[in-house]
Image (spheres, rainbow, N blue to C red):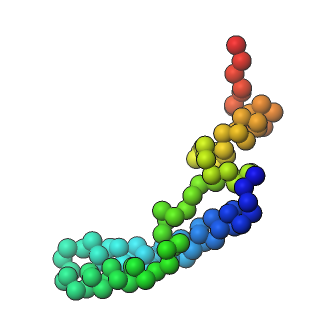
Amino acid sequence: MAKKSMIEREIKRAKMVQQYAAKRASLKEITTNADLPMEQRFKAQLKLAELPRNSSATRIHNRCQLTGRPHAYYRKLKLSRIMLRELASFGQIPGMVKSSW
């Protein structure tokens, strides 16, 4: 089980990403537009740098929904490998059966 503070930090980051998504996208669009003057693009780049670091989507780390484990994460199921195996063994994931031969 991950520390509660780490799980809460990730939730906080996800909220911040949603909050600043539109502003960040518009500033990025300005900075990549080659038709605009260089000064305007540079000012947009500076404004982008002033935004909080946690408002960037790359700062979000995927975590298991049940345990908060950050490693060995299955994106489709939002579970770690350990919880995936455990739930599959108990038959709680539809269509998934633990193999045995």
**Which quadrant of the figure has residue 28?**
bottom left
Q: Position of residue 19 (x, y in %)?
A: 55, 76
Q: Classify 13 as above or below 62.
A: below
Q: Position of residue 13 (x, y in %)?
A: 59, 69
Q: Classify 36 as above or below 57.
A: below
Residue 11 seen from this side: no
Q: Position of residue 64 (x, y in %)?
A: 67, 51
Q: Classify 12 as above or below 85.
A: below
Quadrant where the C terminus is found in the figure: top right
What residue is shown at x 19% (from left), y 83% (from top)?
37
**Which quadrant of the figure has residue 74?**
top right
What residue is shown at x 26% (from left), y 81% (from top)?
41
What residue is shown at x 30% (from left), y 77% (from top)?
30
Q: On the rendered structure, is 37 left or right of 28?
A: left
What is the number of callouts on the image? 0
Q: On the rendered structure, is 41 left or right of 19?
A: left
Outermost top residue: 101
Q: Position of residue 67 (x, y in %)?
A: 74, 51
Q: On the rendered structure, is 35 left or right of 98?
A: left
What residue is shown at x 65% (from left), y 68% (from top)?
9
Residue 83 seen from this side: yes
